[in-house]
Image (cartoon, grey):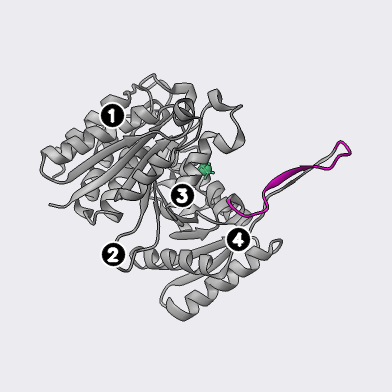
Amino acid sequence: MATHKLLLLAGDGIGPEVMAEVKRVIAYLEEAGLASFAIEEDLVGGCAYDAHKVAITDAAMDRAKAADAVMLAAVGGPKWADVPYEARPEAGLLRLRKDLALFANLRPAICYPALADASSLKREVVEGLDLLIVRELTGGVYFGEPKTITDLGNGQKRAIDTQVYETYEIERIARVAFDLARTRRNKVTSSEKHNVMRSGVLWKEVVTQVHDREYKDVELEHNLADSLAMQLVRWPKQYDVIVTDNLFGDILSDIAAMLTGSLGMLPSASLGAVDEKTGKRSAMYEPVHGSAPDIAGKGLANPIAMIGSLGMAMRYSFNQGEVADRIDAAIAKVLADGKRTADIAPKGTPTVGTQEMGTAIIEAMQSVA
Ligand code: IPM
Ligand code: MG
């Protein structure tokens, strides 16, 4: 059996707690003979700053590059509010994305029937929801230059961020979206703001060309990003795959996450291009939620998004879809059985902690075999 080389970056806040549950799932998979791993661990975010005065060290970056996949939990917290901008916790995450060239961020939003009442939207709006946001992750305003604050010398300052996309960046993310749509309900919604942004004009043009050239069999529609945000809370089930840029993808995926009941439910995969020689692609898997400093260290965090991210690693990096299915089925079973961490429990109902949820998922993995 192939041994999967994983680098675990637990990060800050609730990161170590939810990563601990992933380690238990990994131990279970090994014991059960379902998978084999070689695990390394390192620091990213505020904890890396405390130890090394940077958000991630070059040595950790080298380990990330050498791994088959990186699992990252969460970074950041109020403790690091005043560290230099270049060393802020988020800079570690952004460096991983950029230096590993993880241009395709897959953020599935699935509403488990058992959780339809945990959403702030009506049950009929979200029940059975299954959409996938494909977010461009290494371009756009996150990385565009210039990115500066200049003192104008008259008591005023000028801040500049640059939104920039080139044809190839739009083409490759569009292909990821179309390919995934073919494995699902065969529909892609592309989102930008071509009514105010030149990058939106190019985005729409290039996605349309890729579609007409290579993916005529897939249904394509274009929605302006503001309108899509509105539609996501009005009738989200009209969507299958949504492809959009880095910033709109950041915002729209938080909306999509909340449709499912809680940010604590959503895993994500960030993928690079497939290397033509080795057939491998760099990859990082992380929950969409943040470090939740308010509940850190209390054993309250929901580990489902983190464990679901391991499932995505099994599916997208290790070609072990049956193990991923088993993880997903275990999560669904535990929820159907009524287990709830605090973030997904109706007011006044009993809750379980992080470890108890992890235990329940591992037990369910045995029974859903
Ligand atoms: C996300 C997060 C990050 C982002 C932050 C932590 C830099 O919000 O992964 O969605 O903006 O991309
Ligand atoms: Mg975000």
Q: Residue at x 30, y 60 (%)?
A: 280
Residue that carries the numbered disc 1 in the rendered image: 357
Give yes or no for residue 147 being in the magenta stretch.
yes
Q: CA distance from mark 1 to mark 4?
A: 38 Å
* Tag in front: 4 or 3: 3
- Give the residue drawn at x 61%, y 36%: 85
CB-based contact (under 8 Å), mark 2 and mark 3: no
Label ID, residue 97: 3
Residue linked to disc 2? 279
Specify which label sits upstream in the sequence, 1 or 2.
2
Residue type pointed to by label 4:
Glu
How far is disc 2 from disc 3 in space, using C-alphas? 20 Å
Residue that mark 4 sits on:
192
The x, y position of residue 149, in whole percent, is: 73, 43
**Front disc: 3 or 1:** 3
Q: Is 64 in front, or is 72?
A: 64
The reply to whether residue 185 is in sight is: no
The residues tagged by marks 3 and 1 sit, at their Cα atoms, a distance apart of 29 Å
Bounds of the magenta span?
143-155
Name of the residue lying farthest toward the right: 154
* Cβ–Cβ under 8 Å for marks 2 and 4: no
Image disc number at residue 320: none
For the stretch drawn in magenta, the main secondary structure is loop
Residue type marked 3: Arg
314 or 114, which is in the foreground?
Answer: 314
Residue flagged by tag 2: what amino acid is it? Gly
The reply to whether the C-beta atoms of the residues labelled 3 and 1 are less than 8 Å apart is no
